[in-house]
Image (cartoon, helix red, strand yellow):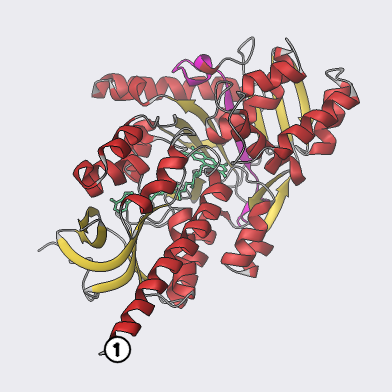
Amino acid sequence: MARDWLKGAKSFYDIVVIGSGLAGMTAANLLARFGHSVLLAEHHYNLGGMATWFKRRGGHILDISLHGFPYGMIKTFRKYWTREMADSVIQLKGIHFDNPQFSVKTTFDKVDFSRILMEHFGIMKDVIEDFFKTARSMNFYDDIVMTTGELFEKFFPGRKDVWRFLMEPITYANGSTLDDPALTYGIVFSNFMDKGVFTYQGGTDQLIKKMKKELLKNGVDIRNHCLVEKIHVKDNAVHGVRINGQDIACNAVLSNSNLLTTIHKLVGDENFDPKFVEEAKKVRLNNSSCQVYMGIRKGEKIDYVGDLLFSSDADEYNTEMILSKNVTSRTFSFYYPDIRPGTNRYSIVASTNAKYEDWASLDDKTYQVEKNRLIEATLNSLEKYVPDIRKKIDHVEASTPKTFKRYTLHPSGTSFGTKFEGLKVSRDLPKQISGLFHSGSVGIIMSGWLGAANYGVIVANEVDKLVRSMDSKKELVSASV
Ligand SMILES: Cc1cc2nc3c(=O)[nH]c(=O)nc-3n(C[C@H](O)[C@H](O)[C@H](O)COP(=O)(O)OP(=O)(O)OC[C@H]3O[C@@H](n4cnc5c(N)ncnc54)[C@H](O)[C@@H]3O)c2cc1C
């Protein structure tokens, strides 16, 4: 008989959180701390969503999305998780760009970027300062008047090399391009420029274990292997969910599942205003990724070549080429023993942006051939920086947009949620159906570890307000009876 993953679950929770990405977990933790009963339902056997890892024979632990996040993550860990997590954040100081236009090393912060823009690219100090000020002052409530391409053209006309320096890491970090609204660039770029790039010492496995412990301590009922199939709506209000075929009642649902899945599949278009459904249909998904994971044999070492390496053979920055299956622009993340102190192990993960269609359309045999081609191309590229890499690895494998789709259920395996217009649709859900909330990678700004976790906090506060108001209404009714 199939195992009952909901065994012992209650028939009612104040809030059901669908999905344990960083937004879902952060929101669940906060809502439990506020005193609500919370069920966290995750379809996968693990927690973390994209913030995850896997183990392979030979003692390898390979991280999926622990490449770098902005300094702001320290505050998010401290305020909404624990001080211990905040104290485990360390800076990555060796960021390396290597392409036909330039080869530079940076600590990836405002001071160092300004220096490189002046010394290497010959940009005037006043222009640089004005650019940073403009990027920093952008916020969500601004009118969207400019694209990132137009912003660059304004400050650095015709300087495709400068555009590449400023844009390539952000394209990698959140899938945004020159055609996206400049404010999505300004916010994310400024977050990084604040103090540089940071990572979690201990690795994703340690972080997620600590998060699980904290969630349990705060009383969250965590259920893995639990697929939410439906969000039940009646009279424009949420009243429950169906999980693994079982109905559970609740006052509110916070969905960390993909925005479009939440609307079209979990709730169903028939429950929304048709105009809203039309708006939702216009929301574009962001792109997906491919990765090649390389485990270094026990006892082998690699010399320090930097923490993050943006490597490319392309003549200039070009969105189509970055998304193409024949991409040469890839980011190498080097994990030295410092990341998991005491293990004395090394690993390397290469990531590229990718389009789902390019991989989903392949038959099984061609899919394997193409994955092997991706691995070979990655090793060839890496040999330039670590010449004897092939002798040092004893595990290598690749993932594609199909892999991301399978594990996270995101349509087209989108790595970074939706394009900008998704944010408004996500924010408008509770106006359509009382008790229905969404949080997670969306709108470019709310993606990445920091964006997703902070969006979880924002939405958790809104859920708390609603559920409290429902509780106080009930108290008033019972007092008057
Ligand atoms: C290759 C790659 C590299 C990245 N690198 C970085 C990086 O270096 N720095 C950075 O800041 N960000 C990075 N990111 C992005 C970052 O990992 C994500 O933006 C963030 O983790 C997303 O969190 P989320 O809350 O949106 O949820 P997700 O991680 O998308 O998780 C959603 C969860 O919901 C679950 N779920 C969905 N539907 C259901 C359902 N119906 N029932 C039950 N469960 C369901 C899924 O299984 C999943 O666990 C990277 C992403 C990728 C793919």
- Estimate the x, y position of residue 167 in percent, counting from the top left: 65, 25
Q: Quadrant of the N terminus?
A: bottom left
Residue 289 to residue 438: above or below: above
Position of residue 359 in the picture relative to residue 424 (left or right): left
Magenta region, residue range: 320-343
Q: Quadrant of the C terminus?
A: bottom left
**The one of 56 and 131 positioned closer to us in this rendering:** 131
- Estimate the x, y position of residue 13 in percent, counting from the top left: 30, 72
Residue 481 to residue 270: above or below: below
Position of residue 164 in the picture relative to residue 233 (left or right): right
Residue at 62% from the left image edge and 37% from the top image edge:
142
Residue at 17% from the left image edge and 64% from the top image edge:
247
Quarter of the image where one finds residue 296: top right
- Which residue is the site of mark 1? 480
Q: Secondary structure at mark 1?
A: helix
Q: How many marks?
A: 1
Mark 1, Cα crowd under 10 Å, few <14 / some 14-19 / many 20+, is: few
Identity of the amino acid at label 1? Answer: Ser
Q: Is residue 327 magenta?
A: yes
- Estimate the x, y position of residue 214 in percent, counting from the top left: 49, 71
Residue at 54% from the left image edge and 18% from the top image edge:
319
Q: Is residue 305 visible?
A: no
Position of residue 94 in the picture relative to residue 313 (left or right): right
Q: Is residue 134 magenta?
A: no
Residue at 53% from the left image edge and 54% from the top image edge:
453
- Estimate the x, y position of residue 341 in percent, counting from the top left: 65, 58
